[in-house]
Structures are given as C-alpha cells and as structure tokens.
Image: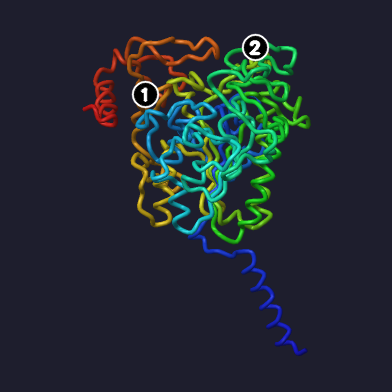
Amino acid sequence: MDKNTCLTCTLLLLLVGLLGCSQRTPGNPNLVIIYMDDLGYGDVSAYGSGTLSTPNIDKLASEGLRFTSGYCTSATCTPSRYGMLTGQYPWRNKRAAILAGDAPLLIDPGQPTLPKMLAENGYKTAVIGKWHLGIGDGNVDWNREIELTPNAVGFDYSYVMAATNDRVPTVYVENHKVAGLNPGDPLQVSYKENFKGEPTGRDNPELLKLKWHHGHDCSVWNGISRIGYQKGGKSAMWIDEDMADNFLKRVLNYIEENQNEPFFLYYALQQPHVPRTPHPRFVGATGMGPRGDSIAEGDWCVGQVMAKLKELNLDRNTLVIFSSDNGPVLNDGYYDEAVEKIGGHTPSGPFRGGKYSLFNAGTNVPLITWWPGQIEPGISDALVCQIDFMDSIASYLGLKNTGPDSENVLDALLGKSSVGRTDLVLEASRNVAYRLGDYLMIPPYEGLAVQANVNIETGLGPEYQLYDIGSDRGQVKNLAAEMPGKLNELKDGLAARLGTK
C-alpha cells in the first residue's frame, strides 16, 4: 500500500469515528429534567449555605449556570409538577392540590403539555420516578390495564410510583399496568376505610421500623405506615431502600437505548421526601440522619446520569435542567431525626419559610441549566420559573408555544441574557403571593402563621406584606406601610395576572 492510499484510509477512518461520536445536529438536542423532591435552596452546597456536601450537583453547577432566582410555581409537589409540565399556573386548575394516591389524572389528555409538544415533533419521551399527578379516572382497578397514566399526556414510556412514597399503593406503574403484579393476589386500595384484618401504624406500632409523627398511620408495608389503605398485591410492592437504584437503572437504560434519537427524559427522584429510606450504603454518609443521607443518595444518582451522558458522547447535545418541586421540610410525618440532627445546616439557605409557605423559601429552589458548548458556566440572577420551560423549549425548536402562562426565557436559561421574566405568581395551599422585580408581596390571609406539625412559617397574616428580596433575602422587614406606591403597583400587577382587575 502506497503512502497516499494509507493517508486516505486514515482520514476515512477518522471521519467515520467523528460521525459516530456526533450522530445528530445540535439543533435537535436531548432534554433531561432532573427533579428532586423537597430539596431546599440551601441543601445544595453550590449555593453556599448549610453544611451538606453535594459534589455531583455542585459539579453540574460549576459546569453550567446556577440561578439565584429560580422558582417552581407552588410550595407543594402536585401543583408544582402540574405547572412545569403544562406551562399553566396551577391555581387555574381547582384540582391542582396535593392528591391522594388513587386520585384521577389531573392533566386533561387534551391539554397541551411539554412531553406532548416534544413527542409531536420527533422526540421520544419518558417519565421515570415520582408522578403524583393522578392516575386513572377516579375508580382505578389496579389489577387491569389502566388507561389514564402519564402516557395519556405525552409520555411514550412511564415507570412511576402513582403518588408519593408515603402514600398507597406502594407499587410501581409501568406504562398502563402495575409492574410485577400477581393476578392471584389482587391489589385493593382505599382512601376511605381500612380493609378488614389489615394492620395499621396506628393500631400496630410493633410492626414499624420507622415511627409515624402525624398523618401517616394507615397501612403498613416494609415496616412503614403510610397515608391510605391497601390490601394484597404483595409481589408488586416496592422495597423503599431499593427505590433509588430501581429508578436509576431504568433511567440509565433509557438513555442508552435512545442515544441515537432525540429524547426528553423527566427523571423525578423521590429524595428527600418522606419516608426517607436511603440504601444501606448511604446510611451515615452525612451525620444528619436519613434526610441528609437521602440527599447524598440523590446527589450520587445525579452523578451517575451525568456520567452516562458523557460516556455516550451525548453531553454536548443535551440540555440538562436540575431543580426541585418545592422548598424544604424537616419533620414531614415521621420521626427520622431530621430535626434533631440538623446541626448548623440551613435547608432554606438565606430565605424564610419552606415547604407549604408563601415566604420565599417555599418556591425559590435550586435551579441549574447545563449544556456544554451552549451554556457558559456562571451564576444568573435572572427571574426564571419552571413554568417557562415549555415556551422556552418551544422557542429553541421553532415551535409555537401552547402553555398559557409559560414565557420565553430561553436566553436567560442559556445564559445569553441576564433578564428573565418580570413578574411571577406564586402559590401555597391555594393562597397566592406575587413577585415583581425584586419585590415580593403577600396579601392578607386568615390562617395559622406557623404550621404546627412541620414547624414552618406559612406567610399568612392579617395585613399586606411587602419585601425587597434583593436586599432583604430573609424577609425581615415588611415595607408595606412605608412604600404604599410600590405596594399598590404589586396589588395591581397581581390583580391583572389573576384577572380580577
């Protein structure tokens, strides 16, 4: 073989190798949303608060864009997830509140959604992890094919828990069926009354390895009592300590199997939602008990996903968005030493409140975007919200937005602009607050100032509250009385958004 032929062969082999590493154009990026559960702004060490270490999430932040004013729409999980997937404020839907495990599908199958938009434009779509947006029509037979699952709202593949890990049924639903169910041992579920002869946490404390504190005293499985009642279905029941590995395995397999076509993956981790049951290899990792250890477990899961994307050379063609569904909570129904072992850690970071709260910590959550070659590493103070993912992704792909409240903040999410949206309506337990620029207003509401069971300030009070979040992140000084003009501006803005002006 002569020298020229040798050179030609070498160049051809090099070209083939390069094509194999980049099989799609950058105009068709994958989208991966990694969504943790009850993770506070201060729970991510990249945000500079608290004492927990989250090295994998920190790496994501150091290589991507970390937002200081990244918001979910609501201070609780169901409405927050609804807003992200539909591009619609959850308070517009009267049913968008924390759902029971047998609640009917919250999203109308005819409603525009982020996965549906992407599926209609050539994407494979999957949700793996926590769902909590309802399943079925309100009268589910768990032993038959279930029509109304996440697949009805745009997901090609779904492998989820029906609601939360502290609610029955404690089974996984894959596409339209309960995974691993033995027809000879049918699953029954009720949120009204217990099944005869079935033990409960309330009546059978000797069966528990994790003692309930409030509201979690019904059916017992795996040594943990839950909300709601169930009977049968033993072959399909999950083991809580294996849940993270179970979900992660399917996430990694999905990425591997779909690496040659554009995909949207919504990976909804259960950590650090109660009951906090980290795998034994993470127990004791933080010294903060199960809550801290489950965050360490979730951080490891994030690292595994990022490693898989890089292993398959998908990193430069994948937009990863990391966030949380709402702010943090310590005691949320079980005695698990979250309060006793918190030490100097500050889950809410510099903010006031937490889960269930109209104060800023309820909805100002960790939010990081990552896309090598497209997003320059840094920190952004732009006001962005998960509700805007739909319009922003639509804009990038040249599609028409169909999320009624979603706004195009694509340039902010990609770090090409320091400006996001101008205002935002926030919600907690059907009450709303309003952010305009650096100011946050909470209207007068009746109710408890502190939610006793979880020991979190709700933000409710008899008078208007106005805070300058820019200079007073802890919401210490109420400016309503001394800034009537600004207060009226926010009143008018909220009224316009609510359609009451």
Q: Is residue 82 left or right of residue 435?
A: right
The residue at the far left in this view is 501
Q: Residue at 67%, 32% (x, y): give it.
A: 233
CB within 8 Å, label 1 to label 2: no
Up/down of 197 relative to 489, above or below: above
Up/down of 144 relative to 363, above or below: below
- The total of numbered circles placed on residues is 2
Residue 75 percent across, percent down from the top left: 47, 25
Q: Which of the two residues, 239 or 296, is positioned nearer the viewer here?
A: 239
Residue 135 percent across, percent down from the top left: 51, 36
Residue 7 percent across, percent down from the top left: 70, 82
Q: In this view, does 360 lie to the left or right of 143?
A: left
Which sits earlier in the primary sequence, circle 1 or circle 2?
2
Residue 433's mark? 1
What secondary structure is marked by label 1? strand
Q: In which quarter of the image is the N terminus?
A: bottom right
Residue 196 percent across, percent down from the top left: 64, 18
Q: Residue at 60%, 42% (x, y): give it.
A: 177
Q: Mark 2 points at which residue?
A: 202
Residue 204's mark? none
- Going by the numbered disc 2, the residue's amino acid type is Arg
Q: Which of the two residues, 482 or 447, is positioned nearer the viewer here?
A: 447
Up/down of 466 relative to 256, above or below: above
Q: In which quarter of the image is residue 94?
A: top left
